[in-house]
Image: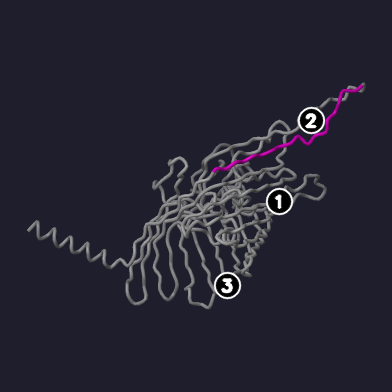
Amino acid sequence: MPKRAAALAALAVAGVASAQSSVTLFGVVDASISGYSSKSQDLKPTVLRNDFRVPTYTNQGSVKVSRTALASSAYNSSRLGFRGTEDLGGGLAASFWLEAPITNDDGATGISTFARRSTVSLSGGFGEIRLGRDYTPTFWNDTVFDPFGTNGVGTNLISSANGFNVATNSSGGFAGNQNYVRASNSIGYFLPPNLGGFYGQVMYAFHENDKYKNGDFTPATGSGFVLNAKTGAIEQASAAKSRTGRYVGGRFGYANGPLDVALAYGNSTVGDQYYPGTTDAVKTFNLGASYDFGPAKLFGELSRAKNSRDYEVTPILGGRPDVDLKGYLLGVTVPVGAGLIRASFSSVKYDYNLPVGSTQRDPKANKLALGYVHNLSKRTALYTTVARVSNKNGAALTVGGPAFTITGGFTPKTSTGYDFGIRHAF
């Protein structure tokens, strides 16, 4: 009996395996020698000693922080993944996709997380319903219409700025938007591919926070006290979140022949507090397009992200002003034999919507990138990229690597970098 049971189990497994129409192991291994340099300057004038005993100040010049590294993912993101599809009959199919980031320069990151993508889906004539962690609709335009694909020192400034937290001078997303590139806990719907070139997707990502039917029972955490905007009473300060992490967005486009154009919008809740009655959101809108003329392919994008705060009861003196992030990108790729020349110019500007009369100037930055890819085969390529960012009025965007020195009277100015590497896909 045990042998017979084992044989039946083996046949059952074989039957399941045969029903699976495809299972694929895939990945990219990308390594580069990369250099980065971030230069800050002291913009104050030199004041010398004088007979009037005016306080003196000697300009400190500039300070440069540089780094040379063996990096990964400068052309394509290094990854290892598994995907598969089962034909369910009647035009239906079930699929899964598990994709892990890897850092092949040091081997420290491997299949310990499927943070790049982790989805299961059902598809048919109606389109595809996809559940799990996936790219947000608004990120697609930033990467698809960038000649450098948002990888390496050539990454456009729209992507760099949206992935940079200006408040903390560090990565973490514009205004703390963790849903800029991907969203977890999401439900996505994709239009079927047979619509004459039209395509699109919508996504909703759950925040997965607790809500209380009687909101006054929301746990009060934090220190100090605040005015309850709903009741007018003084309450213990609360950082309790009931909506932070939610994302809703969509992208719709048309691709036919040499033309590809797409429009996207997304709303990500980046913060909320129950007792003060505030909700912070980053609302992103972008429009991207490309046209392949044959000898050259042109790319372009317009983007705007707004960090706004909604109040249950608007303060008497008005609320916190919105912060806008506007940007544009122009790019081109030119095939040359087995190679491809890539170039782009991108620009962003922060608008703090300051009151009339304010002397503070809005930060802005420009970036120029140039690169070349030489394909040794369909799967293996050598590449090189150089790029330079020019910052003004306190903007602190870099090509990667070390951050600017911003203490001691220094202001971020320029960031330069290069990549020289090899990419192999399998």
Element assignment for label 3: strand
- Is residue 327 among the parts visible in the rendering? yes
Quarter occupied by the C terminus: bottom left
Local crowd size for mark 3, using a 10 Å CA cut-off: few (<14), some (14–19), many (≥20)? some
**In this view of the protein, which residue sits in the foreground, 90 or 65?**
65
Q: Is residue 152 left or right of residue 348?
A: left
Name the residue carrying label 1: 366
The residue at the far front in this view is: 337
Q: Hey, which quadrant is residue 410 in on the image?
A: top right
Q: Is residue 407 left or right of residue 177?
A: right
- Is residue 311 among the parts visible in the rendering? no
Q: Which residue type carries mark 3? A: Tyr
- Tell me which residue sits at (50%, 46%) in the image: 31
- Tell me which residue sits at (54%, 74%) in the image: 198
User: Which of pointers 1 and 3 lies earlier in the amino acid sequence?
Assistant: 3
Element assignment for label 1: strand
Name the residue carrying label 2: 59
Residue 164 in the image: x percent, y percent?
Answer: 61, 47
Name the residue carrying label 3: 254
- Tell me which residue sits at (49%, 53%) in the image: 214
The image shows a total of numbered marks equal to 3
Q: Which residue type carries mark 2? A: Asn
303 is higher (above) or lower (below) than 276: below
Instruction: Tell me which segment is drawn in magenta.
Output: 33-50
Magenta stretch contains residue 112: no
Pointers 2 and 1 in contact (C-beta within 8 Å): no
**In this view of the protein, which residue sits in the foreground, 379 or 237?**
379
Q: Is residue 162 left or right of residue 365?
A: left
Element assignment for label 2: loop
